[in-house]
Amino acid sequence: MSKRALITGVTGQDGAYLSQFLLDKGYEVYGLARRSSHQGVVEHRLRWLGIEDRINFVPGNLTDLASLLNVVETVKPDEVYNLAGQSSVGVSWQQPIATGQVTGLGVSNVLEAVRMRAPEARFYQASSSEIFGKTGGGVQNEATPTHPRSPYAAAKLYGHWMTVVYRESYGMHASSGILFNHESPLRGLEFVTRKVTDAVARIKLNMGRELRLGNIDSHRDWGHARDYVRAMWLMLQQDSPDDYVVASGRTTTVRRMCEIAFDYAGLKLEDHLVIDPAFWRLAEVDYLLGDPAKARRVLGWEPTVTLEEMIHEMVDADLARLKAA
């Protein structure tokens, strides 16, 4: 019989790519769907990948334990991937309580539902490099001290440690992937990489003139979401659960990432860039660089897409979208 996977956040970037990956491996994929008046719009990523009709949607909400208990009991999953949450760092300052309830406490609800209704299921928690926060430079690995710099990061750190607590207290196969920045053509426009590639495409097509950003001197470790969902799956195939940094091992400034996108389109960044203080974070994370040595050694995982290849793919996709609009 095929394995069953339950994915929260199934309509997001990672949920869509993970669904595609698991379907290709013969899984039955169930996606937790929060009731929305935008039904038919929020699934656009799944449609873009051509898999929307292959997902079994089940109603539920991370803030409602009763609904999660019902979902887990109904689906009887072999694997549970908790990818849902309020995922924008910027929005987390505007909605700190909602971010804590969904991105933080929501993890406890999913863990509790799995513990009570499917204790043998293997659980994956989407942690984030944002938990490291104020690093002071250097490389971050699984043992690096954490210093969250946003409500989002603090909520993610809570979820990360609750996963450890359930693993150590109940013997659950519960693992966290500390994923560094990972992008794709499916990224939302509120994220800087997609904001950049969309602006490049608009400028190239004479539909826009400028790109407005805040701090472009911060460093990030970027990879492709397709590579990173493969690491999620590999974690749940191990005999023992654990936590893993998933990263490219290369850090790049936001400025250089922008240059890659503009150069690819035959444009000059300095002709279109506007630095706008409105886009500066209240507390900046200046430097992120992940060490994926453990994932490489234990999981056999390696990234396959370079930053340049990813940005080129995103620019091409945004050009195609705008031309078709």
Image (tube, rainbow, N blue to C red):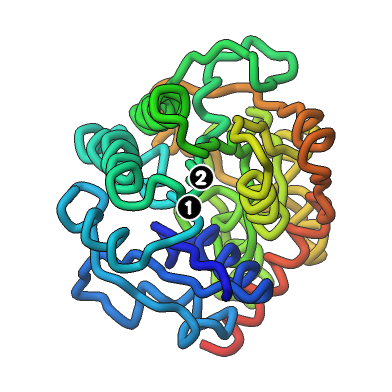
Residue under pointer 1: 81
Percent from the top left, x then y, of residue 25? 68, 72
Question: For the N terminus, which image quadrant?
Answer: bottom right
Q: Which residue is drawn at the image coordinates 61% and 86% (left, top)?
A: 323
Which of the two residues, 276 or 144, is positioned nearer the viewer here?
A: 144
Q: Which residue is drawn at the image coordinates 84% and 33% (left, top)?
A: 297
Which of the two residues, 256 or 305, is positioned nearer the viewer here?
A: 305
Q: Residues within 10 Å of mark 2 (few under 14, many from 20)?
A: many
* Quarter of the figure with residue 204: bottom right
Specify the amino acid type for callout 2: Tyr
Percent from the top left, x then y, of residue 255? 70, 39
Q: Residues within 10 Å of mark 1 (few under 14, many from 20)?
A: many
**Residue 124: numbered disc:** 2
Q: Is residue 150 visible?
A: no
Label 1 to label 2: alpha-carbon separation: 5 Å
Q: Which residue is drawn at the image coordinates 50% and 76% (left, top)?
A: 46
Q: Is residue 87 visible?
A: yes
